[in-house]
Image (spheres, rainbow, N blue to C red):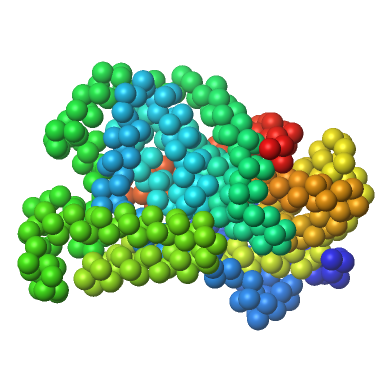
Amino acid sequence: MALASLPKVVLGSFAFAIFWMMAVFPSVPFLPIGRTAGSLLSAVLMIVFHVISPDDAYASIDLPILGLLFSTMVVGGYLKNAGMFKHLGTLLAWKSQGGRDLLCRVCVVTALASALFTNDTCCVVLTEFVLELAAERNLPAKPFLLALASSANIGSSATPIGNPQNLVIAFNSKISFPRFLIGILPAMLAGMAVNMVMLLCMYWKDLEGVAPDAAGKQMSVVEEGGRSPSVASLKSPHPFNGTTADDGNESMMEENISTKHPWFMQCTEHRRKLFLKSFAYIVTLGMVVAYMAGLNMSWTAITTAIALVVVDFRDAEPCLVKVSYSLLVFFSGMFITVSGFNKTGLPGAIWNFMAPYSKVDSAGGISVLSVIILLLSNLASNVPTVLLMGNEVATAAALISPAAVTRSWLLLAWVSTVAGNLSLLGSAANLIVCEQARRAPRNAYELTFWNHLIFGVPSTLIVTAVGIPLIGKM
């Protein structure tokens, strides 16, 4: 794409700089409006400066991603109420040897889950849970939030359904699900291990926490059905009536449900609870199977959410109120801002300048290509980067060999995904973790841009370098 006119480039770059500034410093003294309003301000500036037309601005909002985020928040509320996080906490803490061991488990579980549930979904569902898990053991939240965000990005690289850019790559390249998985899985496992070791090295002294015996006693209380502080913290308010799922208010729940549907009137309290919990698990599993089958991810998640709402037989408004609409607004503004920045032609100009040095038939060319992808993924977002570079990279690789074409697509998937760990703005998953943690009702934590950058830069560079030689080797 050619460069736009000079005024358009300057004004578009200025609006994009405002977006970056507000995302990095959401409470600057001269404009303390926060990330969400800052994102909207940047979007409005793109339109006011005529960098992007109003129609193009609306068209640039990625409704499938917003639908996926919205519906996974709803599904996450049901899974909380079904006790999934209580069971997950028991699993993570089972024979845990302290904070370091727990951090490793969070990394592994998040990475593997992200390959199937998508990185954004895992971050939406697990952020508050990870905060609770750290707080109950007197551990700092920062290493666990970094582990969650970085592992979600790394793990999502392994499958076409792990993140949106992989889905675009799989569609355009016609690479099958098994071939995609086999081609990237070794790099993903190696990258997950390296990322985990780096987290341990950076936060070794901070991960002391409670002694293993104390943690074991806490878990024994959980297994006996006690009401320890840790269990209380893991029990989320029921997303439909503001009470916890195991409170005495269940009698009220029972009355509300039984008056809604005759089937429930014939069931015992235990059977009603078991039915609703089982249904939540079954439809969530069905959602994952549908992802793997290649069905539309956004509508699959929306269908799952509405199925849970309907079967619950209650007014859904209290559940929908708990959705983080400010996060959805932030992403809407970000989509418009990034689209406007792409229309300036700067991202395309960077690629055109570096393309002759980015051949995939040499180590030097692959290194240059990786640097370009890392840079553009953090400037213009990873999905636009994939759309911009995909066909160009594949065309250049086709001059070498058919196998080089497949490997070039897989390299693009790996580097553009891991690039999300470079900075807080590198991927949607990072921003979800940041905003969810900041707005958490308990144990809220502000993960700043600089806190993330200190770990993100070395982790991204090393994990990317470790994974590249392993791409497409199986």
Give the quarter of the figure containing the N terminus: bottom right
Q: How many marks?
A: 0
Asked whether 452 or 212 is in front, the reply is 212
Going 38% across and 55% down the picture, which residue do you hit? 285
| 231 relative to 377, above or below | above
Q: Is residue 154 visible?
A: yes
- Observer-nearest of 379 and 125: 125
User: Does the image show residue 354?
Assistant: no
Compared across the picture, whether 353 is left or right of 138 comes to right
User: In x, y percent, where is residue 383?
Assistant: 66, 58
Q: Is residue 167 left or right of residue 270?
A: right
Q: Residue 287, located in which quarter of the rendered image?
A: bottom left
* Residue 192 vertical placement versus 424 (above, below): above
Tell me residue 172's x, y (percent).
71, 62
Residue 51's spot in the image, x, y percent?
74, 72
User: Measuring 45% from the left and 49% from the top, which residue is drawn there?
Assistant: 122
In depth, the one of 348 and 397 nearer the eye is 397
Identified at 13% across, 57% down, the residue is: 271
User: What is the quadrant of the C terminus in the image?
Assistant: top right
